[in-house]
Every structure is written in C-alpha cells, then in structure tokens.
Image: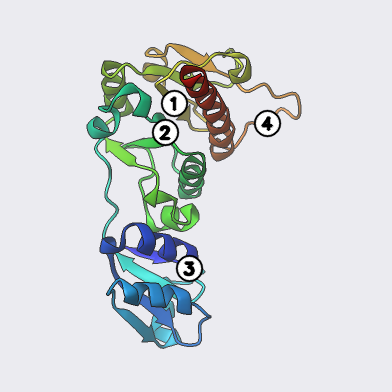
Amino acid sequence: MYLYGKRSINERLLVNPRSVKQVILEHGGGRVPEVAALARSKRIPVELIHTTRFKSITRGIHSQGIIAEVEDFAYADLDEIIGVENTKKPTLILLDRINDPQNLGAILRTCACMGGFCVVLPKHECVDVTETVLKVACGAENYVPVCLLSTLAVAVDKAKEEGYWIAATVVEGGDNPRGTAINFPLALVFGSEGEGVRAGLLKELDYRFTLPMQGAELSLNVANAVSIFCYEITCQRNLNENKKSA
C-alpha cells in the first residue's frame, strides 16, 4: 500500500512511523527535503528513483514527487473503542452502502478535524480503506479509528450494549438536529444517496434526523452531510461537557 503526497506522508511519519517501510522520491519531481529529512530521522529508508520508474509505481496519481510504501491499513477494534468510560466514548459514524472512496476520505478528514469520532464500515456493499481513501484523507486516518465489521447490525448491537443511542439521517420526516437535544454517547448511521439507510437498521433507531433544506430539491453528498452533522454533534457535546463541569 502506498501513500501519496507530502501531507499524507508527513502526518504518518509524525504519528505512526513504524508503519512506513520506505519513502520514495522522484528524481527532479519536487522539493520535499523536509519530509525526506523527517523520514531519515525516523531511520526509514529514503530512495531517489528515475521519473520513468516513479511513474510506473504511481500510475498517473498526483503525488507531488513523493510516495511512501506503508503497511496495510490497520482497522481498530470496536469493542476496545466503545468499551471505555462514558465521558470518553466517541461518537460513531456508521456508513451504510457508501461506495465512493472520495467520500470516505473526506469523511475521515472531517472526523479528524472535529475530534471525538470513530468511523464504522461493514465488510460488504461499502468501500474499505484504500490508497485513494488515504490520499483524500490527507493523514486523517492517523487520528480517526476506523472499524470494519461483518455488518452494521453487529455494530449497532455492540453499541447498544455499551449504552449508545442509535440515530440515522433520513431525507424527510426526521427531527432537525439543531432543535433537538442530542443524547450521548451517540451512533449515527448515514446511508447512500440513492438508497438511504437500509430498512433493517431503521428498525433499531431511537430517533431520526433530517436536515432542513429550503433551496433546490437536491440531496446532499454524504460527505457534506457528515460534515454538517459532525459540527452540530461537536457543538452539543461541548455544551454538555461545559454544563457538567460548571
């Protein structure tokens, strides 16, 4: 597995250097001395190769003249993630039938920026963490645990056992998240733009959310929807924490 670009590689070297096998630079491909120096300081091999060979590895993917060979992505254990005390339980973002790696990468980046989130994926009918996902995430995978389970139903059952409230986003008929006092810890399910959240998961919900939209009759890209909900969740979570500490 490869990482592409300065930002992704720099973050990995800072947070998880043991997962980096080597850093590869394109001869004359760009100025990346700071990343190369960081790799060498971590005793990670740095190789400078000819453009022809470099392009055969990158297969036309924009890389800023630097790539890193890394270990396969390591998924987190959901039981360990949610089995902590209530104040430390992250909000779970469950993705149902999300197949675009660009969306998953953007979702990871949002969750990393907001903090306090964990992404849960099912093994079937959903994209997993690929090189494309990591490129879009720009290093976010180092700050957001990602769990891979057989089905989301299993994740919901585990979350309920740990006291989680289960919610989902729906196109219509749900509560406005801004006017709703959100309960924590929370697991929030997002479905595909075409099919939404599958019926079996909808039966497990404590409540549903719908974003009020007064503009064109279009659906939001799932990554955009996740960004809006993560911001609202973060605001309410911080408000709850401030009330408890007051």
Would residue 56 be seen by someone viewing this image from the given angle?
no
Q: Earlier in the sequence, mark 3 or mark 1?
A: 3
Q: Amino acid at mark 2?
A: Leu
In front: label 2 or label 3: 3
Secondary structure category for the residue under label 1: strand
Q: Amino acid at mark 3?
A: Lys
Residue 189 is marked as 1
221 displayed left or right of 91: right
192 relative to 37, above or below = above
Q: Secondary structure at mark 2?
A: strand
Q: Marks 4 and 1, Cα distance to the nearest angstrom? A: 20 Å
Spatial CA distance of label 2 from label 3 is 28 Å
Q: Which residue does the numbered mark 4 point to in the structure image?
A: 218
x and y, in percent, of residue 198 in the image: 42, 23
User: Of 85 and 185, which appears nearest the observer?
Assistant: 85
Looking at the rendered structure, which numbered label has been put on residue 33?
none
- Quickly name the residue at label 3: 6
The residues bearing labels 2 and 4 have C-alpha atoms spaced at a distance of: 20 Å
Q: Which residue is mark 2?
A: 95
- Amino acid type, label 1: Val
- Nearer-N-terminus badge (3/4): 3
Q: Residue 75 at x, y = what percent?
A: 28, 45
**Circle 1 Cα neighbour tier, 10 Å, few/some/many (<14 / 14–19 / ≥20):** many
Q: Please indicate, yes or no, whether residue 49 appears anywhere in the rendered image.
A: yes
Q: Dividing the picture into quarters, in which one does residue 89 lie?
A: top left
Q: Residue at x 34, y 82 (%)?
A: 47
Q: Nearer the viewer, mark 3 or mark 1?
A: 3
